[in-house]
Image: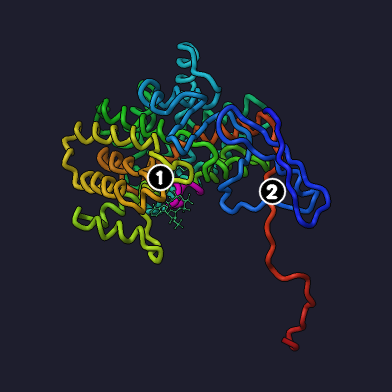
């Protein structure tokens, strides 16, 4: 990192404070504010809108220009030329694999897709209509109970095998959530299938007959996983890093990430988009909902729109929209009413002064739900799919942080509570 500096003048200190400025490969320079504390200051940045929490080489986002790079490769290129598991290798190891490296990685992941039989008993403890994200928080956190042999985070081999286990087992656990929900038997993974084909078979196959994977749907599923793989220091990834900074095991850290992703402002938005489209119900109601979204006194927000970083089109949304058209055409659903509402809503919003002025564009969640619904995935499973795809991002950031050394994350605060005061006895209050 090249070093410049900024000079901070403050009324109540004699000499100005010089703070180093670092430049990365791309993006904003950062001011190293660690020197402030010795001079009696903290920085103040609720929501971390202006805070760089770490140094990373994994993903770069240029929100103003709608750019998303994974290890330098644009998301549009990876979506067109790569596949999810190859992108997992890239995110974890930093380079695209050679043919032999990729074959070895695929075999490695495939051979870790089964979960311990005892985990199946967990699911029986949940009511059939438990939200699958609640089950995933529990099941993924509990994985660490089965792998005492590889929880030493200071051991590089343990770190990697935990990363492989998590990427491999998430689709299996996700499909188990769905099967438990509908009362069907769990399907074991089929090692002859690709990652996404295997997931669709575990979701929709039954022991009663062979399941024929539709290649268009398998390709769409793979794109959904790939487009959700990683996204810099978003809320859930930052949670995984913070949990990991205490030395917690990777399964516990990813469980914390799953819990964070669940929120409707984050990964829960795809489920909320479908609920919103169903609530709108007809194109004639769109204007009413646009007005609600613009009304400061109405908490309603247009789900699937807006982003903390993208103030231009989310490049993932463009690919997702194209995939949506492909899937609905394949399934003969081109006239799907929800798709028609979504496309009309997008058109109206993109022409509306409020959305233009606030730079609110469709994000990754706007079209993904329509694809998943068309594939037959129930709405409450949408965020589970997001978590499955994002697991590689979470564990790649965890692996980068633990491999390169870390301090426990411990932010401070602006305290506005009482100064010290005397305790008054009960009888005198
Ligand atoms: C994801 O961080 C990531 O990278 C996340 C993610 C990832 O891959 O990990 O990209 C995945 O979480 C995508 C976002 C999914 N969430 C939604 O679609 C929910 C709807 N969107 C909003 O809740 C909101 O846009 C956020 C949460 C996404 C971003 O919120 P910010 O950055 O905190 O922006 P903000 O709330 O300060 O909004 C700025 C202004 C506000 O108006 P003012 O207070 O300035 O008058 O824009 C308005 C907001 O009211 N606004 C919206 C809006 N989003 C923002 N108004 C109506 N509808 C919306 N969707």
- Please say whether residue 110 is visible from this viewpoint: no
Residue 262 part of the magenta segment? yes
The residue under label 1 is 383
Q: Nearer the viewer, mark 2 or mark 1?
A: 2
Closest to the observer: 8 or 295? 8
Task: Identify the image quadrant of residue 362.
Answer: top left
Question: Which x, y percent locates residue 412?
Answer: 69, 53
Report the predominant secondary structure element of the magenta stretch: loop
Measure the C-alpha gap from mark 2 to mark 1.
Answer: 29 Å
Residue 300's x, y, as percent? 37, 60
**Residue 92 picture location, percent across and down:** 54, 26
Residue at point 34%, 44% (across, down): 366
Query: How many C-alpha atoms fall within 10 Å of the one at disc 1: few (<14), some, or many (≥20)?
Result: many
**Seen from this angle, which residue lies furthest bottom?**
427
Q: Please state if 108 lies on the left or on the right of 320 as rendered.
A: right
In this picture, residue 47 sits left or right of residue 186: right
Callout 1: SS: helix
Residue position marked by numbered label 2 in the rendering = 410
| Location of residue 400 by image quarter | top right
The residue nearer to you, when weighing 53 against 107, is: 53
Q: Which residues are magenta?
A: 259-267
Q: Secondary structure at mark 2?
A: loop
* Front-most of residues 27 and 407: 27
């Amino acid at each position: 990192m090249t070093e410049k500096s900024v000079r901070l003048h403050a009324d109540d200190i004699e000499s100005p404070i010089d703070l180093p400025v670092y430049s990365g490969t791309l993006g904003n320079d950062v001011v190293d504010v660690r020197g402030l504390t010795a001079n009696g200051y903290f920085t103040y940045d609720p929501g971390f809108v202006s805070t760089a929490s770490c140094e990373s080489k994994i993903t770069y986002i240029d929100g103003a220009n709608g750019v998303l790079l994974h290890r330098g490769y644009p998301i549009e290129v990876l979506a067109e030329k790569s596949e999810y598991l190859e992108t997992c290798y890239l995110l974890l190891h930093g380079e695209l694999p050679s043919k032999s490296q990729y074959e070895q990685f695929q075999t490695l992941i495939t051979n870790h897709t089964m979960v311990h039989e005892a985990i199946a008993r967990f699911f029986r403890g949940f009511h059939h209509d438990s939200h699958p994200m609640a089950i995933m928080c529990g099941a993924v956190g509990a994985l660490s109970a089965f792998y005492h042999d590889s929880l030493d985070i200071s051991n590089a081999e343990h770190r990697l095998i935990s990363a492989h286990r998590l990427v491999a087992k998430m689709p299996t656990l996700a499909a188990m959530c769905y099967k438990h929900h509908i009362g069907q038997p769990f399907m074991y993974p089929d090692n002859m299938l690709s990652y996404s084909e295997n997931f669709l078979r575990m979701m929709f196959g039954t022991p009663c007959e062979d399941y024929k994977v539709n290649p268009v749907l398998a390709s769409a599923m793979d794109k959904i996983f790939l487009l959700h793989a990683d996204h810099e220091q978003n809320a859930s990834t930052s949670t995984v890093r913070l949990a990991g900074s205490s030395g917690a095991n990777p399964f516990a850290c990813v469980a914390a990430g799953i819990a964070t992703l669940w929120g409707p402002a984050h990964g829960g938005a795809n489920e909320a988009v479908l609920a919103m489209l169903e609530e709108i119900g007809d194109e004639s109601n769109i204007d009413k909902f646009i007005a609600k979204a613009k009304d400061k006194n109405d908490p309603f927000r247009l789900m699937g729109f807006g982003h903390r970083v993208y103030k231009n089109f989310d490049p993932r949304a463009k690919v997702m929209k194209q995939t949506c058209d492909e899937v609905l055409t394949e399934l003969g659903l081109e006239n799907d009413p929800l798709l028609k509402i979504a496309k009309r809503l997008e058109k109206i919003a993109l022409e509306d002064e409020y959305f233009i002025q606030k730079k609110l564009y469709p994000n990754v969640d706007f079209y993904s739900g329509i694809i998943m619904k068309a594939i037959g995935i129930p709405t409450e499973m949408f965020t589970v799919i997001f978590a499955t795809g994002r697991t590689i991002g979470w564990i790649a950031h965890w692996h980068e942080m633990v491999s390169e050394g870390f301090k426990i994350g411990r932010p401070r605060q602006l305290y506005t509570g009482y100064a010290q005061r005397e305790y008054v006895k009960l009888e005198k209050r």
